[in-house]
Every structure is written in C-alpha cells, then in structure tokens.
Image (spheres, rainbow, N blue to C red):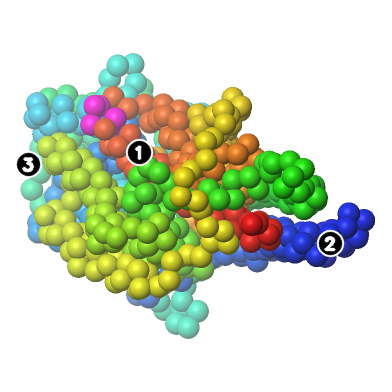
Amino acid sequence: AKVGKIIIARRGEKAGGASRESILLNASAKLLGTMLQAVATAAAAALLAAPAAQAFYLPGVAPQDFSPGALVKLKVNKLTSHKTQLPYDYYSLPYCKPMHFEFTQENLGEFLTGDRIENSPYTIYMIENTYCNVLCKKKLSGHGALSVRDAIDEEYHHNWIVDNLPAASEVDSEEFITTSYSEGFPVGYKEDGKHYLYNHVTLKLDYHTVREDPALFRVVGFKVEPFSVQHTFKDPDAAWDGTKGDVPPLKTCHVDKVMDYQDPSQRPPQTVKAGETVIYTYDVFWAASSVRWASRWDIYLTMDNAVPNRVHWFSIINSLLIVLFLTVMIAIILIRNLYRDIVRYNAQRDEDGDETGWKLVHTDVFRPPSEFRMLFCVCVGTGAQVIACALLTVLFASVGFLSPANRGSLMVALLLLYALMGSVSGYVSARLFKTFKGKTWQRCTSLTAFLFPGICFVTFLMLNVMMASYHSTGAVPFTSMLSLVGLWLFVSVPLVFLGAFIGYRREPIEFPVRFSVTPRPIPDQPWYLSTYMVLLVGGVLPFGACFVEVFFIMSSLWMGQYYYVFGFLFIVLVILLVTCAETAIVFTYFQLCNEDYRWWWRSFMVPGSTGLYVFLYSCLYFSRLEANLTVTYFLYFCYMVLVSGGITLITGTAGFLACLAFTRKIYSSIKVE
C-alpha cells in the first residue's frame, strides 16, 4: 500500500490537478492495501492454524477408568450404507439381542443424523482375553435371509461403540488386510453370486495404563475383524437349542487363541439362505498401547494418515494464488485504470465533450434495483446470517470446542448458531430495504425469517416422510421435530424481527451522489458482459479456491468419512469470501465502464454462481455412491440443492457487500455537478 501511494503521488504531480486525483487515488491505495492485508492475514492464519488442524480438540467428556475385570460395555449403532443413504436400526437384521434393551440418550444432532445407540449382548471385561465365545443361535427365515442378502448387496456396515470409541474395521483376505476407520465393518460379502454373513468377530481392544493409578486402565483403541464361519460342533451328534447353558465345543474356532484367516475350502463360510442356522461367536483380545486417552481419536480424524496434510496445504496455496491473481488485477484497475479515468474526467469541460465511462452513470449507479427489491434485501440478509453462522461454527470447531466424541455436537452448534444469528439477517435486510425507500418492512422481515428456513424445512419434512416410509432411523422422531420447529419459531424468528426493528430505526445507507428521477438508457452491451456469460465465468475462480475442501466435505457427508481439519477449512472459507469480493469488484467495474448501472443483482449473482458449480460438481460426485434406490436420488439431490443454495447466499452476499463499498468509495472520491 505504501508503494502504491508513492507511485500515485509521483503520477499525480506530473498530471496536474493533483488535489482531486490524489483523493481518489489515495482512497484506491487504501482499498488495495486492505485487500493485500486480507491476503497476508489469510497466509498468517494458515501458519497459526496448523496446530489446530492436527486433530486438536477439547474432549468434551471425562475419561472412564476401568479396573481389571470390570465390565466394558459394547453398544451398537445404526446400520449404514453409502449406496442407499438410509440408516437402519441394528436389530432390524437377525442378530443376537440382549435380554433387556437400553437406549442411550441422544441429542437433537444425533437424531438428525440417524443415530440409534443401543446395548448389545456382547460381554467384555477389562484386559481379560476370551476366545470362541458363543453368543446365540439364529435360524434364518425367508424374510430374514432376504433382508441379509439385501444388506450385503447394498454394502451395509455395522457401527459399534466401546467407551464412546467407534469400531474400526480390519477385514482379512488372502492377498491383504484392509483397515478402515470411518465406516465400521461390513455385514457380509458376496462371491460367485453367493452371499456370506460375517457371524464371528474378533474384538481387538487397546488399553493404556492410567499414569496416576497403575491399577486402572483406559480404552484407547477398538478394532473389529469379522469372519464368516459355518460353525460345526466337535461332536457330530451334539445338539444345542440356543438357550443359555452349556454349549457343546465348536470345531470351527479355538478356545486358546483368536481366529485367523483360513482358506474357505478348509473352513466353509456362513451362507445366507432360508432355513440356515447361524451361530454367532466372538473373541476378545486386549493389547497394551502407548497411545494416551486424549489422543485416541487422532487415528480416526487423520484416517491413519490416509490423507496427508500436504493435500490441504496444496488447497490453501492454490486458493492464495487465485486471490493473489485477483488482487493484482484489482491493483491494475485501482491504480492504472482509475488514475487514467480521473485524469480524463477532470480534464473534460462541459463544452469540450460529454462524460463517458463509469462517471457517466453517476446519477443512476445508486438507483435501487428495478426488480425484486424486497427479494434482494431478503437474500442479502439471509446470506449475512449464513456467513456469520458458518464463520462461528468453523471457528469453534477449529479450536476444538466441537469434539467428535460428542456425537451430533456439530449439527447442534450449526442449528443453534443459525438461530442466534437471526438478528444479523433482520438488521441487514431491514436497513437495506429502508435504503431502497421501502415502506413494508414487516413483510420484508417476515420473508427474511421464513423464506429460506421455510424452504429448508419443507424439503426436510418431505424427505423425512420418505425415510419413514422405508422404516429408516434417518426419519426424525416427532418430538425432535417439535424441538427443531421450536428453535426456529421461538428463537430465530423473534431475533430476526428484533434485528429488523433495530435496523429500520437506523439511518439509511448514505450514497455520495443522488440518483436522477428518470433513468438513462443503457447501451447495448458486448457479448462477454451478457448476464449468462458473466454468471458462467464469475463462479469459476471462487469454486477453484475451495474445490479441494469441497471434495473432503462431500466425502464426509455422503461416504461416512471423518472430517475434522476445521483449521484448514476456516482459512479456505476466509479465502473464499475474499475471492468472491474481488471477483465481484472486477466484474462490476467492467459493467460500469460500459455504462450499465444495474449492478445490484449482478454483484450478488456473479460470485453467487459458485453455488451452481458446487451443484454441478455434486452431480459428478454422485456416481461414487453407486445408488440404486429412487429415494437415494431424492435425498442426495434435494439436500445438495439446499447446500448449493446456501453457498450461493454466502458468496453472493460477500460479493455484493464488497461492491457496495467499492462503488461508494470511487464515487465519493470524484466531484460531480
């Protein structure tokens, strides 16, 4: 910025009329310096946020200590599939059930994500290894066998929990061992057209000794290695009715060691067909670990370093290069083009010629939009609310306040912050509407409070009914639905009206020039400034600044993978807002230079087209799901339309606010008659 001021001062001395030029050019230098400072701040934040992006979090729950031989509960959660996106209750399949069901109390976020955590009949004792434990015997009915086959075809996975730690999957095969930390372990597998059920599991648990008391231990790791075994008794004539009591010894598992992989020809797998008897068994194996309790989530959040941090650093560097490119372009506009324009405008006389370029439309540039003024105010107000909500949520998550150990906490924080930011949307929309000389601010406020949330709620309600028709746990219960409606109607809506009341009592936004009574005609615009062309081009750079993180977020939403690098996400979000602001300024300047003063909606829609690119990318990403149900198409595309709409509001509002500051600055720096 200092270098820019020196250059401007030297040019001003040569050109003459320095008093009027220096005002604008110094203002331009200040604006340029602010943008460069934003880029530098983002780069500095990248360095400062590196520790926050490495799985640092506040656990949110106190560690639970176990003495040797103490009972360690194994809980079961929903069955999930990325193919259908329909979670189901664990006991909807023919599995062994406990004598009495115990449901873990869940928050609103867990209900919205379809979690249903229940107890299980598995018995685990701290640091006590047990092998070939027989759980129960089930005879598959025709419906039960069909349900298991469908679950295997649709790649459903178990989600088990021990001491609030999700189970990782370790699937053994002849070639290699596959370990997954995000999706649990599969129900079974299909081979040569036949379905096989995993009916034996080896529970591999890691423990760490409590430093303060060596007689106590904590669970720091949990893996499940499933096997498919056609169990047989050592005595061919032995029989077991499946009730509790003495179980005849099994020939197909060992009582002194865990089960290991064997060729199916030596130990036949458990087939799935009607009338087949299935015996469920399990092993428990404990191993000491050097991992401390506070770090036990690290391997899940980093996916065992499957995605190195350099990928996210590449994303940030890519985004910073885009911002640098736009900043240089704006520097050229502010220092070179505006300087040339001001020299020409100040040299003109009324008798010498007419005004041209962006100064020519000074009597129309702040004319309110001729179409959909109220809708424009509603969109900007809602966008400001979503921006505030997104920034605060990602900021809290990046410093560790939203722990992955607290399931549903991120969803609860997102909903709560959105409701609390209602005052922001009310204030922004009401004050902008008053600036447009609107009178029916109550109607504008009502639309702000109900339009976007109402669209989201109606869509959510429709999809909830569809999921309920499939008996999926993804269907939110009625009481949770009431909580959601209450949060909207009794928290968000009153805050929107409170913000609107304050905003409408404030003075309207002041503009440096007044607009005339009669709008001037707009000349024909070149093809590259047509609406469709600028919308097509405007969203490319903002999407390019965030597409890497969009991929990981999509994988978290639809593939069940963990995403917890919120430090990186916060940096990318800031860079995205800066990119949208600079993109909108560039296009608005070109538009004003061509004597088209209709910049209000265009400054919103040009960067807002980023949402369109996100939706188009989601259409390409959908092929990864391998969906085969109609309801999955509805779930995916309806939710992605809402997500893309939210991104449009965020990016569009950032672009408009930047253009508003830009136009006020340049027109306040020139003298007009």
- Give the image location of residue 233, x and y in percent: 20, 36
C-alpha gap between disc 3 and disc 1 = 54 Å
In this view, 118 is above or below 553: below
The amino acid pointed to by label 1 is Val
Q: Which residues are magenta?
A: 629-633
Q: In the visual, does 254 lie left or right of 387?
A: left
Give the mark nearest the N terminus, 2 or 3.
Answer: 2
Q: In the visual, does 338 lie left or right of 429?
A: right
Give the mark nearest the N terminus, 1 or 2.
Answer: 2
Task: Give the foreground label among 2 and 3.
Answer: 2
599 vs 34, nearest the viewer: 599
Q: Residue at x 27, y 47 (%)?
A: 456
339 vs 249, nearest the viewer: 339
Q: Residues within 10 Å of mark 2 (few under 14, many from 20)?
A: some
Q: Are marks 2 and 3 in contact (CB under 8 Å)?
A: no
Q: Is residue 375 magenta?
A: no
Q: Main secondary structure of the magenta part?
A: helix
Q: In the visual, does 134 lie left or right of 128?
A: left
- Outermost residue to the front: 351
Residue 315 seen: no
The amino acid pointed to by label 2 is Ala
- Outermost residue to the bottom: 212
Q: Residue at x 45, y 35 (%)?
A: 612
- Give the image location of residue 629, x and y in percent: 25, 27
The amino acid pointed to by label 3 is Asp
Q: In the visual, does 12 lie left or right of 163?
A: right
Kind of element beneath mark 1: helix
Kind of element beneath mark 3: loop
Q: Residue at x 42, y 29 (%)?
A: 619
Q: Which residue is mark 2?
A: 18
Disc marking residue 641 = 1
Q: Which residue is mark 3?
A: 241
